[in-house]
Amino acid sequence: MRILGIDPGIAIVGFGFIDKQGHKLVPVQYGSIQTEAHTEDSVRLKQVYEAMVQLIDKYKPDAVAIEKLFFNRNVTTALTVGQARGVLMLAAVQQGLPIGEYTPLQVKQAIVGYGKAEKKQVQEMVRMFLHLSSVPKPDDVADALAVAICHAHSATLLQKMNGATKR
């Protein structure tokens, strides 16, 4: 199963494709989509959408995992990230891909086993899970990979639960 993890944003969108091969997680491609700060939001959203469509077409994931918004004191930032989430989810849904949404707490619990883990702990676990030589940069990329790993763990759990209920 190939999973695309997304850390949404308008300035930087982190993305990471991983393959789940049994109990093994293999990184396929990861990076970021970046837009210029002095460009209108509508143009930036279009750029993010188009770049994501190209990535989906190229790497052909079976599922998408995206980070849910959490409460943000800065309403403007929250709205903009919400708009970015919308166009990113649209890019996935238009390709018929299922989407898993995870809060930062859920991601931290899945990766580190502790919902209040520090960002550096999560990043180091991502590096270890995927056997990378260093933590991916910028942070948004490591976050996207963490969301993908969280989805891989959730998919495994769901398969086990479905198998148990069929007996």
Image: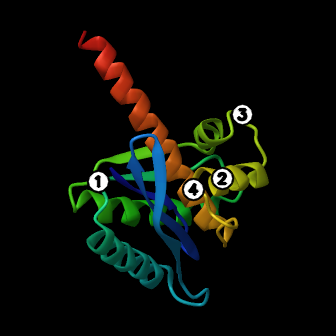
Answer above or below: position of 50 versus 147. Answer: below
Residue that carries the numbered disc 4 in the rendered image: 130
Compute the Cα span from label 4 to label 2. 5 Å
Number of disc labels:
4
Q: Is residue 143 left or right of residue 82?
A: right
Quarter occupied by residue 43: bottom left
Going by the numbered disc 4, the residue's amino acid type is Leu
Nearest the camera: 84 or 141?
Answer: 141
Residue that carries the numbered disc 2 in the rendered image: 128
Mark 2 or mark 1, which has the lower sequence index? Answer: 1
Answer above or below: position of 114 versus 146. Answer: above
Quarter occupied by residue 35: bottom right
Residue that carries the numbered disc 1 in the rendered image: 62
Residue located at (44% from left, 43% from top): 152
Mark 3 or mark 1, which has the lower sequence index? Answer: 1
Residue that carries the numbered disc 3 in the rendered image: 114
Q: Position of residue 42 (x, y in %)?
A: 43, 80
Going by the numbered disc 3, the residue's amino acid type is Tyr
Q: Nearer the viewer, mark 2 or mark 3?
A: 2
Mark 3 or mark 4, which has the lower sequence index? Answer: 3
- Kind of element beneath mark 4: loop
Compute the Cα span from label 2 to label 1. 23 Å
Q: Are marks 4 and 2 in contact (CB under 8 Å)?
A: yes
